[in-house]
Image (spheres, helix red, strand yellow):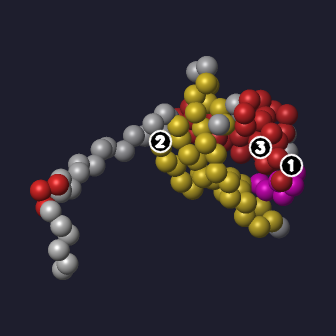
Amino acid sequence: MPDLGFRDNVMGPQPMAKKKTVPQDLLDTVAQILDLIIEGNATALTALAKSSAKDETARLASAVKTGAYNDKRVIATARTNDHYWIKAKLTGPDAKPFVLQLRMGLEGGNWVIW
């Protein structure tokens, strides 16, 4: 093994924090968002987005063909401070799976797309 230099600065392994559970109201909001995407309801979807994300959210809604998907599921979650990253997958009988990622944060006590 090569010499890694001065070992006085090495701190050793760091303790892992306990995983924080994803709030249920966030998961409920994500389910609502995915349903709106499946339905193609861009107006209601953009209402669940922060003002700086409304244009991108509208583009997301227009990228999905209405009625092409009938199933949704969250495939991954991550947290950075008070924001959650949600990766979700939409599937349908005759459509390629559609994978999307949302950044969710609290604004005024409600979860919104950032």
- Could you tell me the amino acid type at mark 3? Glu
Label 1 sits on a secondary structure element that is helix
Estimate the spatial distance between the alpha carbons at disc 2 and disc 3, rounded to whole Å: 21 Å
Residue 36 percent coordinates (x, y): 78, 41
Is there CB contact under 8 Å for labels 1 and 2? no
Residue 88 percent coordinates (x, y): 63, 53
Question: Badge 3 is on which residue?
Answer: 56
Magenta stretch bounds: 64-70
Query: Quick check: 31 above or below 9?
Result: above
Does the magenta segment cover residue 103?
A: no
Estimate the spatial distance between the alpha carbons at disc 1 and disc 2, rounded to whole Å: 28 Å
Q: State the image quarter where residue 56 is shown.
A: top right
Q: Quick one: 23 or 87, which is closer to the camera?
A: 87
Question: Badge 1 is on which residue?
Answer: 62
State which tag comes first along the sequence, 2 or 3.
3
State which tag comes first along the sequence, 1 or 2.
1
Question: Badge 2 is on which residue?
Answer: 80
- Could you tell me the amino acid type at mark 1? Ser
